[in-house]
Amino acid sequence: MDAQADETFRDFVANRSSALLKTAVLLSGGDRHGAEDLLQNALIKVAGRWNRIEEPEAYVRQVLYRQHISRWRLKWPRRELSVATTPEVSTPADAASAAELRLVMRGALARLTARQRTVLVLRYFEDLPEADVARILGCSVGTVRSTTHRSLARLRALAPELAALGPATVEQQPSQHKSPVEVRP
Amino acid sequence: MNVEELISDAFREQAADTMPAPPHFADRVLAVRRRRRTRRLVSVAAATVTAVAVAVAGPRLSTGRDDVRPASELNHNDVIGHPDQSPPRTLIAAGDTVLSAFYVTKAVEQPNGDDVLTRTYGLLDQKTGVYKKTRWAFLDVAPGSRTAAVLEGELPARRIGLLDLITGRVDRWIKTDRGVASVAFSPDGTKLVATTYAKNPDRMFADHKQDIDGKEVPGPVPSRTGFTVVDVDSGKSDWHKAPHPTDETGWFGNARADFAFSHDGTLVYAETPMKPFRDYYSLDGDRADWPADEKGRASAKAGLSPDGKLLAGEFAGYGATIAAAILDPHTHRQITTVPVQQLLAWADNKRLIAWGCDPKKCDGKGEFHNQLLLVTVGTNKVVPLSGFRKASADYPGRWTPIFSKR
């Protein structure tokens, strides 16, 4: 990396790392340290080919997603998420407000597998259609669809409160196509 | 609301709750990248050697069961802290630096009335990543944390061992013509400076009493003769005379006054209790000046940052404020401070490992109730790396850390 590349890389990290870290935290199910490690490793990979990348953010995000579901990381024993409280099973009546429901959902999302959570982040945080998710993760549209279906079923099993909600649509097209390079606050 | 909308809301709420990335994240990323690239180059070189060896020895294929990478490399997380451990039990590291060993000193009374201040080392076992009690009387760990130079008791020793931290075996002994009681690696790991003594510098002699608080107790005898620069590969050594400095009142200070290498490895120095506080020598044994950019007081062990742009300074606190100075190495002006007591080692160009006390209990004896912290220059953020040492300067089990490059 020459001096100019070093400078542009540092600028990119300074400007974009907080936004990228948000995505990494979601992928890691709220594990902040795991998220920093994930982002750090993605940025190291990107630094190696910095001069040849045209759209750095899209590239970093792709590395972030693929790295998170790579077999090597899934095999890594330290990826287990430890939380201070045991997950509580509550009845639908307990989950009164939307805020509570979001908290319940957050807890359930943290207990999904890395692959399941990654697909949900791409579908419902990045608002990407199934075809784009498949392209980013390097798998088929069918795999994205079945993983989404299984993830939703698993969320319902983990949080019975969700039964009170309306049914999930089979294929919900995002209202507006958003590229992963879009600048998020 | 359906499940997808709730997932979306939960994600957005969690993203909004996420604190910004740490400051100097790019520095951290580039430092880890540099470290991994260096290791990869070393691994390629090692793999070439191994391949040649296997070709000569015949087809004895590895089953992959014996992973020979050191623990400090297998766990490549940027910061590995154990705030519940004092003394440490499992690997502590930050950035490019690892706590490779620590020691505990104990006065052991001898049959003749002497006392020997004996060190017990906890040394990182690179196979398991835990600190193990060792039998060595003195040691230093080489950059890369794969090898330690070890001395046997009682000091001074007549040979230096090169201990493999993965196998726990001494690979090679280097004989010395004179008795040595300390060893220190050069920054590139190719040389050792061993300090030579006529007597054990840790022995307090009953026939050389000293007065401590009105009580006569065994005292030290100055016996430093000089230093030997050892080439680690060839084992060749070169001795130079360098006794303890004296002034008009005679000798004053510690019997142990060991040599270490300067930041760039071109000079060696020993600390002195009086001005100029450090005596520098060239590797050929000539007296040398204290390098301008390293100049500062000796208690900030961290010295110059790896890129040479910052110099770790002294304690700079006042009143209840705990702070240590960060200096410009050219002007020696204070650039900023960090909220710790003593700067021990640089983790990279912006972060330091330091002793820090509990801010609420730093008064009086509380200053000794301290733990290893990682601090970033330009921020007040500290990350605990170890548990607290007890609030006493001198208790059995009080440990002193030794750091080396990861």
Image: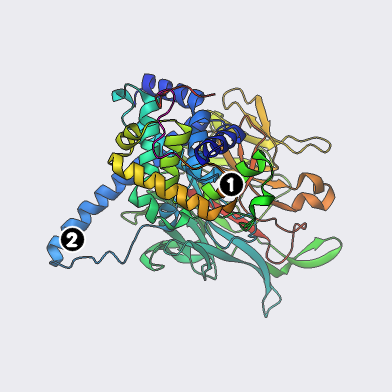
Judged from this view, the residue extending furthest toward the top is A4
Any part of residue B84 in sight: yes
Place of residue B226 in the rendered image (x, y in percent of width and height, measured from the top left): 51, 52
Q: Residues within 10 Å of mark 1 (few under 14, many from 20)?
A: few
* Res B224 → quadrant: bottom right
Give, as a single range, the part of the protein colored magenta.
A169-177
* Res B256 → quadrant: bottom right
Residue at which label 2 appears: B53
Place of residue A5 in the rendered image (x, y in percent of width and height, measured from the top left): 37, 22
Tell me the residue at 16%/57% (across/down).
B52
Q: Compared with residue A101, is residue B176 higher up or lower down, i.e. above or below? A: below
Judged from this view, the residue extending furthest toward the bottom is B111
Place of residue B388 in the rendered image (x, y in percent of width and height, measured from the top left): 70, 55
Chain where mark 2 sits: B
**Foreground residue among B104 and A181:** A181
Residue at which label 1 appears: A164
Place of residue A48 in the rendered image (x, y in percent of width and height, measured from the top left): 33, 32
Q: Main secondary structure of the magenta part?
A: loop
- Left or right position of B330 against B246: left
- Kind of residue indicated by mark 1: Ala
Q: How does the figure colour the protein chain or chains?
A: rainbow
Q: Quadrant of the N terminus of chain B?
A: top right
**Foreground residue among B181 and B294:** B294
